[in-house]
Amino acid sequence: MAILGEQGAAGSSRFSPIHCIIPPHMLKEIATRGNGSQRAWAWQTLTLSEQMRGQRQALSVIAAMGTTATGTKRRTVYDARNGSRLPGGLVRAEGDPRSKDRAVNEAYDGSGATYDLYFTVFGRNSIDERGMRLDSTVHYGRNYDNAFWNGQQMVYGDGDGELFNRFTIAIDVIGHELTHGVTQYEADLEYQDQSGALNESFSDVFGSLVKQYKRRQTAKEADWLIGKGLLARGVKGKALRSMKEPGTAYDDDILGKDPQPGHMKDYVRTRDDNGGVHINSGIPNRAFYEAAMRLGGNAWAKAGQIWYTTLRDKLRPASSFKDAARWTVAVARELYGARSLEQKAVREGWVAVGIRV
């Protein structure tokens, strides 16, 4: 979910998109079905989102606080102490010993795992390719049910314990949100309709790859779930989304039923959620899953390389699903050869979700 917040930098202010992990369709279900406090929180978040719609402006390049040598991690974790002022008090910097606070360690480790995937596998020097420091703030708000990338840093709530656990608990959520930063510096996919759904899908793809890389899992061994462990005990569901089987992640009395389609025949046309960016992202998500499974082995090795190169070099702000399919097939050819197994797997992955190129 993207809402807009005013961020000041170097004495100026601008509107920057805030990408949240909890999507609007889930917030609306909570606002209708939840208890008093849950409804109030959901409506507050939805209201802010609606107020800011239409004010989204192109991001100017965000200062990375200096370029650092390639391969140099710079992680900092702050504690908001249940307030809303960012970044909060510094509690752990790069190289510091582990904290007694689980959320601090999870934020530190998760941003490190994301850095490792991008640097080791794709040769990328942090989020912006210039060694950007990876800042995180934990304990944001009181029982705050969300996590977001605000264009400059990660922010995590503790969850309310009834619907959601602490938001640092899922490493793929951390990878997902930080990938919004990568997309911001590369294709800068517009957060609307199909380009917005691609924006969300690339974050799910690389969020899942962060988890798989950290666990050294093959495509076959991976669960392909986004946010496993985030739903609190008693909630009927296994995660926020399933890349393998979109639409099956949860079916709960308060959260509602997972609305994601996995095929173009079920594409959802809506004005909500910026044209259904969190809903229709299930289609390109499944296309990646299908391609990765056909290739076998580690999904980051070939499928991930194709998707990353496409995001970095080929896509443009208004790119559609068809554009993504066409370019990933073209990149597979460039990297592995015409009529190669890799090109065939990518093409078949898109065919599986109803897109032919």
Image: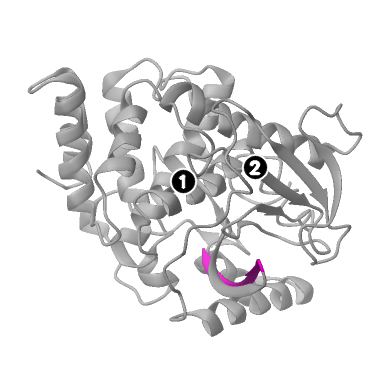
Does dot 2 land on a helix, a strand or a loop? loop
Amino acid type indicated by mark 1: Val
Q: Nearer the viewer, residue 288 or 192?
A: 192
Q: Quadrant location of the C terminus? A: top left
Indicate the amino acid at tag 2.
Arg
Q: Quadrant of residue 255?
A: bottom right
Question: x%, y% of residue 306?
Answer: 29, 31
Farthest right residue in view: 100
Circle 2 packing at 10 Å, graded few (<14), some (14-19), many (20+), is many
Q: Residue at x 59, y 49 (%)?
A: 64
Please identify the residue farthest to the bottom as the structure is shown: 51
Point out residue 156 in the picture as x, y percentages from the top left corner: 72, 53
Determine if the magenta segment contains residue 51. Answer: no
Q: Which residues are magenta?
A: 1-10
Q: Is residue 199 left or right of residue 79?
A: left
Specify the label residue 182 is tagged with: 1
Residue 202 appears anywhere in the view: yes
What is the CA distance from the residue labelled 2 to the residue labelled 1? 13 Å
Quadrant in which residue 245 is drawn: top left
Residue 260: quadrant of the picture: bottom left
Residue 6 inside the magenta-drawn segment: yes
